[in-house]
């Protein structure tokens, strides 16, 4: 994976064989996205996972057979992961979606303009028949001695405890823009700015997929094709895909509106809740500061191995702080590769 810029038009990468220099003329950045995790009391307990994180572990061989799992947070990924866990033998106790019923209904109605997505959504819900799907619902806290035993759910002012073995909790996706920032690309609203041919503010540097805005796999695929064709000099072929991209982006915009995070989630953490797991920085300590830079200098928040990828996106939501600067290496690497 690429971790630094060695010189103009030369990237540094870490490979199984060691460090490597990669020279480029027209790179296409497709660095994807990561899930947003928000802090709440007990979120650092063993067996509390990110939604995508648990799915990745299961795909890697971790067994969830006969485990009672609550899937919570925001977005359609909750349904997809719940279905995957169920096929691996897990019992899905509940799916807690923070989005309101009204917003979800409006989004579902909009799917009639995209029959294929409507069929896909209906099929997924059918597979999860019998699993409680609770809208206007979110996790308030998690409890356990050595690991997770139960969680507190909140819905429309009422709270109750649910026993479970695992909690998968994630609140939408956040674009990975670190490499683009390192290359000097213009960033707007947390996304890489691109023109109609997916070219960034840097000539001959292109970007596609989630870094330009989270809009689903179809949008990422067509953006990648446009970027590839444009980089190869075939602008006419790239232009023929603009309408398809625009349609995919409109779906993504509707998706983001429907599953936008509610303000109540900002009040979940108490003063003792850890926000920066790498450096053990609690919420109460961070309330003393006005921006991420000052908090980082005084508490080391964001200076751990994840380099602010978890706490940075959390504090952006909690305090409306701008992310910190990006410095190489953008990933932890072996000293020998530096």
Image (cartoon, rainbow, N blue to C red):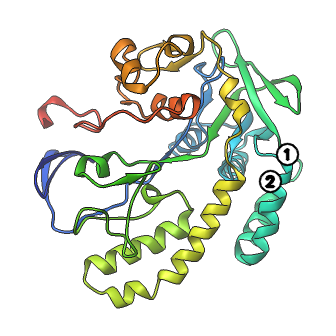
Closer to the camera in the image, 128 or 102: 102
Report the disc number at residue 131.
1
Residue at 46% across / 13% down in the picture?
A: 280
Q: Which mark is residue 227?
A: none
Residue at 67% over, 62% down: 254
Asked if one can make out residue 66 in the rendered structure from this viewpoint, the answer is no
Residue 122 coordinates in the image, percent (x, y): 80, 65
15 displayed left or right of 97: left
Rendered location of residue 153, percent (x, y): 81, 27
Residue 57, compared with residue 229, is above or below; it is: above
Quarter of the image for the C terminus: give it: top left
Report whether 274 appears left or right of 13. right
Kind of element beneath mark 2 = helix
Q: Earlier in the sequence, mark 1 or mark 2?
A: 2
- SS of the residue at dot 1? loop
Nearer the camera: disc 1 or disc 2: 2
Which residue matches tag 2? 103
161 and 322: which is toward the camera: 322
């Amino acid at each position: 994976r690429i971790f630094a810029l060695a010189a103009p038009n030369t990237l540094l990468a870490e490979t199984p064989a060691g460090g490597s220099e990669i020279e480029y003329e027209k790179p296409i950045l497709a660095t994807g996205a990561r899930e947003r995790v928000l802090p709440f009391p007990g979120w650092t307990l063993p067996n509390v996972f990110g939604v995508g994180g648990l799915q990745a572990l299961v795909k890697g061989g971790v067994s969830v057979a006969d485990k009672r799992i609550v899937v919570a947070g925001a977005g359609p990924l909750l349904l997809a992961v719940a279905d995957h866990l169920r096929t691996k033998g897990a019992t899905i106790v509940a799916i807690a979606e923070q989005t309101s019923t009204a917003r979800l209904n409006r989004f579902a109605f909009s799917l009639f303009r995209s029959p294929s997505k409507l069929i896909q959504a209906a099929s997924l819900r059918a597979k999860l028949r019998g699993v409680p799907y609770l809208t206007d619902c979110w996790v308030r806290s998690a409890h356990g001695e050595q690991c997770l035993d139960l969680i507190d759910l909140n819905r429309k002012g009422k709270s109750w405890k649910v026993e479970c073995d695992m909690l998968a909790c994630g609140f939408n996706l956040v674009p990975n823009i670190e490499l683009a920032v390192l290359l000097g690309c213009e960033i707007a609203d947390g996304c890489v700015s691109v023109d109609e041919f997916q070219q960034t503010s840097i000539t001959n540097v292109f970007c596609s997929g989630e870094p330009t805005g989270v809009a689903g796999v179809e949008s990422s695929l067509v953006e990648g094709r446009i970027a590839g064709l444009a980089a190869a000099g075939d602008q006419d072929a790239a232009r023929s895909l603009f309408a398809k991209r625009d349609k995919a982006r409109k779906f993504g915009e509707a998706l983001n509106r429907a599953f936008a995070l509610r303000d109540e989630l900002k009040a979940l953490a108490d003063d003792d809740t850890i926000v920066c797991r790498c450096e053990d920085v609690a919420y109460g300590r961070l309330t003393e500061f006005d921006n991420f830079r000052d908090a980082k200098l005084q508490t080391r928040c964001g200076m751990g191995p994840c380099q602010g990828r978890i706490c940075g996106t959390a504090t952006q939501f909690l305090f409306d702080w701008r992310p910190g600067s990006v410095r190489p290496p953008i990933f932890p690497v072996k000293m020998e590769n530096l």
